[in-house]
Image: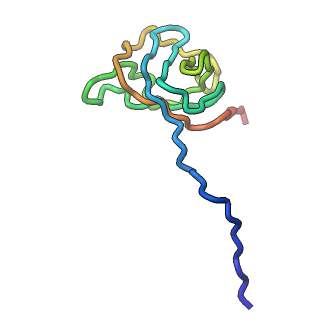
Amino acid sequence: MAREAVFPDFGTVNTQASYRANIIAISNALPCVVEIDVNPGFVTNDFVRLTDLNGSMPISRGQDPLNNYRWKITLITDTSFLLKYPVTNLPVDSTSYPPYVEGGSCNLIRNNFEYTAE
């Protein structure tokens, strides 16, 4: 006798929720502060990736050293946060980085992840 699979109906589930914001400013400071246009749900201790900042874009947008890395954030306001290194939890010093020009995106990559020594 064949078994029948039963799947519960959860309705429509949007697994492609967008946790992405447009970057509107990045400071050259210690700590480095990022300002975004709208907060898509970021909270303190989230991990984000800044993209489309590098010099290989048609127009350089500055802040190349921040491009495409994982950063831990601490919210300052709803639309601004400071960047921290994920392992050390120390603030990022962007005083020697190229100045921010324009554009770029900030993408949530993980909520509240903790690095451990093990």
Placement of the N terminus among the 4 image quadrants: bottom right
The residue at the point 39 percent across, 27 percent down is 104
Q: Position of residue 13 (x, y in %)?
A: 60, 54
Q: Position of residue 91 (x, y in %)?
A: 59, 15
Of 89 and 23, the residue lying toward us: 23
Tell me the quarter of the picture where residue 82 sits.
Answer: top right
Left or right: 14 as drawn, with respect to 118: left
Of 24 and 97, the residue lying toward us: 24
Placement of the C terminus among the 4 image quadrants: top right
The residue at the point 42 percent across, 9 percent down is 96
The residue at the point 61 percent across, 27 percent down is 86
Left or right: 7 as drawn, with respect to 101: right
The residue at the point 46 percent across, 12 percent down is 27
Of 108 and 67, the residue lying toward us: 108
Q: Position of residue 76 (x, y in %)?
A: 61, 15
Tell me the quarter of the picture where residue 100 sits.
Answer: top left
